[in-house]
Amino acid sequence: WYVIDHLNMINRSGHSFFRKMFLSMLYAYMLVNFVFSLVLVGSLYGAFSIFVSEYFDEEECGSFGGARILETAYLSLLFIFILMSITKPISKSGWIYSLFVVFFGIFIFISIAVGLNFFWKNRESVWIAIMLGATLVGSYILPPIFNWNRMNLCKYFFGAIILVFLSPTYVNIIIIYSMANLHDVSWGNRETDETNAEATKRALEQFRALYLIVWIAANVAYGYTIIYITDTNQTFFVLILTVFVSGQVLIKLVSAVIYFFYEKYT
């Protein structure tokens, strides 16, 4: 947040025009990532809902088939976890958190399977499918290609599967728990005066409550906006989101390849 608040300092620096331009582009990229990270939970649920609805071909909200069962289960897990994050210390419920890790990991593989079905049905956007495929293949194939003589392929691909399985642990579990415990940010800087410490704690708890409400509302609004737009047979929003995410990964992949050859041959 400090960096974002001081973006105007770039123009006052002694850097050249082109360096200022590239720094501005970098910080704009960071700002977009920051905003997108605030609605990751809503994005993941919105994508999951769209994919399972397309797979089970359920368009009416009143129908309660496979898609609604999966959506209800997913939302129930989110709701229960938010309550647990607010009310119960993680040290006293480790096994329950482990169950959430397993459940959300299962949901991510379901989401990937039905997501492939979604993009297959909407394959008129061939170039988006190619971009998505290049992103997935590049992310997991390039590392062993560039390090084939230093890497155990079995362990690598097993680790890649575990990485995918644990990705909802970050998106749902870690982010939600962090947002629900923003008041506990005084690690190593606790007040020595008990009166000041109590006042600081109350102020932080009030801020946490307000921020958590706004954050939950933003994720709900964002997730259901994606679902509503797609329900009106306008899949462009999901495709744009796919291009956005894949584009970021491709930029990182291309930059990594350039850096690899630069370090190897210079």
Image (tube, rainbow, N blue to C red):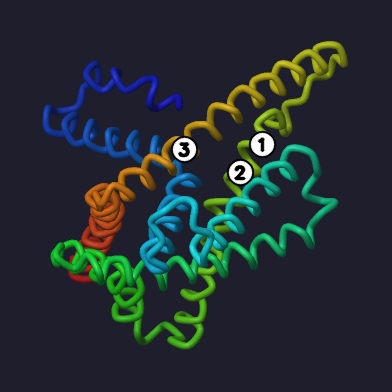
Residue depicted at 50% across the width and 68% down the height? 163
Give SS at disc 2.
Answer: helix
Residue depicted at 21% across the width and 22% down the height? 14
Residue under pointer 1: 180
Residue type (three-letter) at the residue carrying disc 1: Ala
Give SS at disc 3.
Answer: helix
The quarter of the picture where residue 187 lies is: top right
Tag of residue 176: 2
Give how far apart the Cα atoms at labels 2 and 1 are: 6 Å
Residue under pointer 3: 38
Q: Nearer the viewer, residue 6 or 170?
A: 170
Give coordinates of residue 49: x percent, y percent: 45, 56
Residue depicted at 24% across the width and 49% down the height? 234
Give how far apart the Cα atoms at labels 2 and 3 are: 10 Å
Categorize mark 2 by other alpha carbons within 10 Å: few (<14), some (14-19), many (20+): many
The answer to whether the residue labelled 2 contacts the one labelled 1, judged by CB atoms less than 8 Å apart, is: yes
Q: Earlier in the sequence, mark 1 or mark 3?
A: 3
The image quadrant where one finds the C terminus is bottom left
Residue type (three-letter) at the residue carrying disc 3: Leu
Give coordinates of residue 185: x percent, y percent: 68, 31
Residue type (three-letter) at the residue carrying disc 2: Ile
The answer to whether the residue labelled 1 contacts the one labelled 3, judged by CB atoms less than 8 Å apart, is: no
Q: Nearer the viewer, residue 7 or 31?
A: 31
Give coordinates of residue 104: x percent, y percent: 59, 62
